[in-house]
């Protein structure tokens, strides 16, 4: 195989792993960073932070390949996904499964130095990531399952830092479930017509005409849980200012999705990066910057 052919395969693998679309990585990364900062009181060991950042990239990439493998017979019938490598048959199923094996192996090597509890939770995280694509066949709201899969870095981060998983960690995971339902319903609103035609279950279809209300309610519950976590930890103005900004961002999303226009709903989905970033900025300001002014 010559260099041009190798480059072509690598480009296809990059698209299969969605490295050209980093929004998924960010939506996994923000909750993981929330957990690392809270568990370590704002001072996560640099090596541990790098392990979780790289692990997020690897596992999100593996999750995308598994998702496309599971949906390889559905994606050709959806306008937005028909050109994905497995849907277009430019990458074989054997190649895809081999790529998953490599990504999961690399992720496992990353957590070798961590505790037994982290390893146990990683096994659960792998199961969730591998099984999520199949929940779209029968779960009415598969986005809730996605929230578990996307947020399992939260208990893993607590386990890595504290060697235990506190109630606050599980509440952060619950907050992430509601956030995932909110942003992935916005995403599902883009594909509503295609999903009806091919028979895939999504929250956008389950909520029906109440989809917008459900999205906004999920944002409100997310912020309420995050507020409870901050209150129990005696956080102050900086943290809650971050939540206020996140709430304003959620309000902006309402203006984007209220007419249910495909591209505006997709824009709202992408914009959730800033929701996660606002919460993290509030945490950093509370835990790392406030002592400078006290």
Image (cartoon, helix red, strand yellow):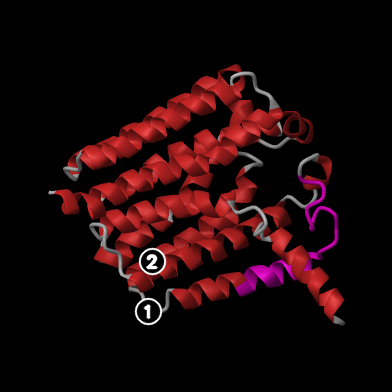
The residue carrying mark 1 is 113
Q: Position of residue 147 (x, y in %)?
A: 48, 45
Q: Position of residue 19 (x, y in %)?
A: 65, 59
Q: Residue at x 63, y 30 (%)?
A: 265
288 versus 44 height, above or below: above
Secondary structure found at label 1: loop
42 versus 114 height, above or below: above
Q: Residue at x 40, y 42 (%)?
A: 278
Q: Position of residue 217 (x, y in %)?
A: 44, 25
Tell us which disc is closer to us: 1 or 2.
2
10 Å neighbourhood of mark 1: few (<14), some, or many (≥20)? Answer: few
In depth, the one of 152 and 56 nearer the eye is 56
Q: Quadrant of residue 94?
A: bottom right
Q: Position of residue 25 (x, y in %)?
A: 55, 55
In depth, the one of 137 and 286 nearer the eye is 286
182 versus 273 height, above or below: above
Is 130 colored magenta in this rendering? no
Specify start and end residues of the magenta stretch as a single range.
81-102
- Marking on residue 271: none
Residue farthest along the bottom direction in this orientation: 1
Q: Is any part of residue 143 visible from this angle?
A: yes
The residue carrying mark 2 is 49
**Count of marks, rendered view:** 2
């Amino acid at each position: 195989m010559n260099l041009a052919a190798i480059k072509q395969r690598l480009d296809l693998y990059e698209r299969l792993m969605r490295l050209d679309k980093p929004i998924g990585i960010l939506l996994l990364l923000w909750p993981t960073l929330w957990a690392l900062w809270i568990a370590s009181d704002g001072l996560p060991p640099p090596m541990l932070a790098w392990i979780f950042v790289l692990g997020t990239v690897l596992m999100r990439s593996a999750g995308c390949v598994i998702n496309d493998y599971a949906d390889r017979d559905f994606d050709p019938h959806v306008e937005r996904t028909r050109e994905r490598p497995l849907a277009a048959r430019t990458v074989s199923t054997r190649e895809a499964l081999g790529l998953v094996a490599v990504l999961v192996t690399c992720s496992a090597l990353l957590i070798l130095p961590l505790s037994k509890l982290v390893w146990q939770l990683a096994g659960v995280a792998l199961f969730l990531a591998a099984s999520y694509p199949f929940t779209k066949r029968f779960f009415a709201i598969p986005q809730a399952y996605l929230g578990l899969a996307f947020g399992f870095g939260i208990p893993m981060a607590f386990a890595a830092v504290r060697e235990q998983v506190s109630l606050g960690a599980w509440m952060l995971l619950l907050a992430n479930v509601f956030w995932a339902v909110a942003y992935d319903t916005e995403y599902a609103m883009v594909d509503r017509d295609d999903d009806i035609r091919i028979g895939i279950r999504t929250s956008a279809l389950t909520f029906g005409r109440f989809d917008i209300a459900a999205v906004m309610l999920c944002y409100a519950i997310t912020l309420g849980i995050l507020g409870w976590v901050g209150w129990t930890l005696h956080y102050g103005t900086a943290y809650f200012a971050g939540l206020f900004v996140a709430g304003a961002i959620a309000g902006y999303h309402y203006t984007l999705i209220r007419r249910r226009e495909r591209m505006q709903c997709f824009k709202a989905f992408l914009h959730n990066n800033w929701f996660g970033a606002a919460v993290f900025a509030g945490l950093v300001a509370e835990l790392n910057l406030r002592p400078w002014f006290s």
